[in-house]
Image: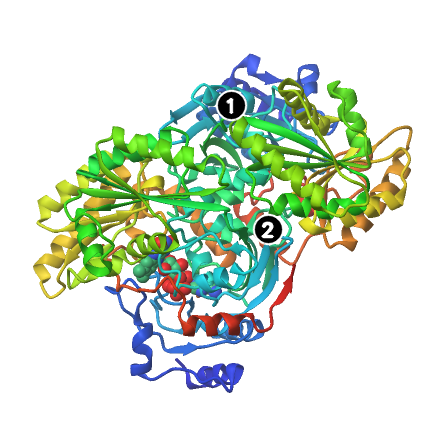
Amino acid sequence: MEQSVLQELAAIVAPQPLLTQPEELLVYECDGHTLDKAPPDVVVFPTNTEQVIAIVKLASRHGVPFVARGAGTGLSGGALALEGGIVIEMCRMNKILEIDYGNQRAVVQPGLVNLHLSLAVADGGFYYAPDPSSQGSCTIGGNVAENSGGPHTLKYGVTTNHVLGLEVVLPNGDLVHFGGAILDTPGYDLTGLFVGSEGTFGIVTSVTVRIMRKPQAVKTLLAFFETVEAASNAVSGIISAGIIPAALEMMDNLTIQAVEAAIQAGLPLDAGALLLIELDGIEDGMEADAQRISDICQQNDCQNVRVAQDDAERALLWKGRKEAFGAIGRLTPNYYTHDGVIPRTRLPEALTRLQLISHRYGLRIANVFHAGDGNLHPLVLYDERDSEEVERVLKAGHDILQACVDLGGVLSGEHGIGLEKKNCMSWLFSEADLDVMRRVREVFNPQELCNPNKVIPLRGRCRCGAVTHDDTPDHETHEAVAAAMQDAHVHA
Amino acid sequence: MSTLDDLATSLQSVVGDEHLLTDAAAAPYAVDDVLPSLVALPEDEAQVADVLRLADEHDATVFPRGGGSHLPLGATPERVDVVLSVERLRRQLAYEPGDMTTTVQAGMPLGHLQGVLGAQGQFVALDPPATAATTIGGVIATNASGPRRLLYGTARDLVLGISVVTADGNRTKAGGRVVKNVTGYDLTKLYIGSLGTLAVALELTFKVHPLPPAEATLGVACAGQADILPVLTAFLRLPLRLNSLELLNTAAMAALQANSGVAVPMSPYLFLARLEGDAAVTAGQKERIAETLRGLSLSAPAVTQDWQPEEQQRLWSCLAAQAFLPDSVTAKVGLRINDLAAFCADIEALSTDPPWLLHAHAGNGIVSVQIPVGDGNEETLLVQIQSLDACVARLNGHRVIERAPVAVKRRCEVWGPVGDNFAVMQALKASYDPKRRLNPGRFIGGL
Ligand SMILES: Cc1cc2nc3c(=O)[nH]c(=O)nc-3n(C[C@H](O)[C@H](O)[C@H](O)COP(=O)(O)OP(=O)(O)OC[C@H]3O[C@@H](n4cnc5c(N)ncnc54)[C@H](O)[C@@H]3O)c2cc1C
């Protein structure tokens, strides 16, 4: 990149420094998808919207590619600077601008950590519903780009259902506003179109979200089964009975073993599968629903149902779920995180296919996933030093996605397509379908400088480094939330 | 032979004689009193594509249509060459109750779909004002919604995937048939509410919900505008399974009483709250509401009202039907939830005669304002719309004129002003429909 461009860039964000040294850029070579790497030329840390506009205009004028980055926890290579250029790191724009309890809204900057928003509004009796397992580190801006989900999105929906308005710097540097605090803005739903665009339509500089009242009551159950088939049948049974739990998560035996080793929650090591089921809402009728769920589990050969007795036990069970990826990391040098979706009724078949794939390639596959909405996360265990094994892992990954598509499902439920799955898009979409998507992207990003070329052949590899977090906020988190709240306008 | 005659001949060979209407037969398909030259009723996807392709070749404009119940939404067109009605595409293509998803053709009537799903104890959680003719495609194109949006959201929360035919006759799809999906750009959101200006919807996949075990409706009458905010706040703070919370002013209540034949406690404002759960659960919730209301300091105690189950049904269906009130200007206003009371006060202060009907989805900040035409002429109606706009602007809200006499529509900005994002909308329209064939001029900013 030209020295003059770097100088202009430095002037925009001064006195904030730029990162340009190879060793400084190492961290930015990849995100949570670590198999593909590409260093940017420079990393810049804007602190306000005006700086973002100036950076984008500069890049556009000089034809330099740029990509926004939040916490870099993405699992599909979204934040990778594939063609070099500028990484616009948004983490300094992490303020909460406004909290309006009466109107159930908050306005935040994109670099705010997801969990910090829920913590900030907790005293007001509110929370922000989308809760990716990475919520202790991932940012709201990253969530908007990926349309992230989480365990509790079964009942309450994913990011797109909670984002009402956006301030966006378009790839030409124009500042525009989509939607807002008020619902049903006349015109095309540009907010809805933007959410999930994986950083290719522009840079988000402010996000208006819906915050929700915390439920009156919560009940968390754990049901153990001898086999994953029995557990999947119980999932179908619960859904068919017309009960929509807040969360309905499954872990298989391998995951149970890993989690138990990590957190000692007293999980039975011989169980073939467990379901973590959470009900929330009003207290009235909850006991009855819990009983019905328990009965359905019993009818499906459940070994045992355990009900969390207090908040501490509930927190422990969730800790096990949210840190399951990390726990698996203790069993193996590397693992490859998949993210596919199937129609819920095909769950037993899907799990059987996964077992076959595991046998065929001689690889261990751990399953920990959002069973309620059919969102699978098979984790393929391997050792990257064994190149022959890596080959098998890639083939297994291909077969896993193929199985999802065969069963009427899709390529990704929450992690995105990014760099990782581009090649598979043609399994689901015709050339005409993809052309429409390309043309829509051209409307926003005609120069293709904003996160370019994420539409490239899949190399079929993905694994992620585990990001762990503790559910009880530590001192540092408290400080961060307090700092984020510093200038927030709070309305009752 | 004129181009349109030529087009008529070609279209006839595609859809068949009896499915190409002209002259008097085309009259019921008028768009805002503008008679279409041709009405094509294709029976399948291939015919839809052919109609679009032929219209394109003949430089003809195309106005997609479902059941026509929400057709008044949109600016009045200059000229209507072809109305393309999807009313014959009315099949359910897939339904797996265990997956809680269904795929239907765009011309399927909403009521028909709810019947099929209801037999399995499920429903699509969309309850817009509808007639027997209202189609799924029309509901999605207009992003129509109803009281249940409080709990279930709107089309953007319920549509999982969509197949469309673009103006060039190509079929494309977005989304899928599973409940969670980030595979590719979310074009589904773009099509919802786009009023047929980008493409013609062919098939839609919905997320369905279990029907609630039972519902109960409670009326809460308020003595004045000053009591609206405290009562609304109480409702939104209480732990309830509340699927609807509507607010009516006296004029809307009077209309509801007259139309339903159900006695409504006449008062300045009335909340209608609909709770979900079996009888024991809703009884407990009602008790909690009553107790909370007693604890509020209001200008006068709020009066609660119960109705028989059959009366409750009638109230809700008549309330929905009021959207189709003839001889009125109907505006949809969007506000911050907490500004609803101030808006009511502003409208009261106008002391309009005859009084306007206000009906709000109170928990969402969406208000339907109906201005009776009475013997008012065009000029007085335009002045009244200006007064309304001033109230909306004061609260930084937005408004759309959903229904109005055509003469009025021609002279007011139906969609209100455009924002700083309008260039993006124009570019999207240009990308999808460069020759402006589909519903030209009807959408925001004349798109
Ligand atoms: C252990 C672990 C668990 C996870 N669990 C879940 C889960 O339960 N559910 C789930 O959905 N995901 C999960 N993820 C994936 C990941 O955390 C999410 O995709 C998250 O939203 C990424 O946020 P981020 O801030 O890290 O974004 P990054 O990885 O930094 O970026 C992701 C994308 O967002 C774009 N972007 C970032 N900021 C902006 C901005 N301001 N404007 C425009 N584009 C921007 C980037 O360009 C990139 O394309 C998990 C990841 C890990 C490592």
Give the labeled residue for mark 1. Answer: B114
- Relative side of B410 to A263, left or right: right
- Nearer-the-camera pick, A333 or B16: A333
Residue occupying the far top of the picture: B18
Q: Is residue B280 visible?
A: yes
- Relative side of A489 to A63, left or right: right
Give the labeled residue for mark 2. Answer: B425
Q: Residues within 10 Å of mark 1 (few under 14, many from 20)?
A: some
Task: Compare marks 2 and 1 and give the one earlier in the sequence.
Answer: 1
Instruction: State which chain disc 1 sits on.
Output: B
**Residue at 58% from the left image edge and 42% from the top image edge:** B435
Q: Quadrant of residue A211?
A: bottom right
**Residue at 43% from the left image edge and 38% from the top image edge:** B172
Q: Nearer the viewer, mark 2 or mark 1?
A: 1
Q: Amino acid at mark 1?
A: Gln
Q: Which mark is residue A123?
A: none
Residue B274 image position (x, y, % from top left): 61, 32
Residue A286 image position (x, y, % from top left): 44, 37
Residue B437 image position (x, y, % from top left): 59, 38
The quadrant of the picture showing ligand 1 is bottom left
**Residue at 48% from the left image edge and 37% from the top image edge:** B159
Instruction: State which chain disc 2 sits on.
Output: B
Q: Is residue A38 above or below residue B5?
A: below
The Cα atoms of the two marked residues, 2 and 1, are separated by 33 Å
Q: Quadrant of residue A36?
A: bottom left
Residue A252 image position (x, y, % from top left): 21, 46
Residues marked 2 and 1 touching at CB (< 8 Å): no
- Nearer-the-camera pick, A97 or A48: A97
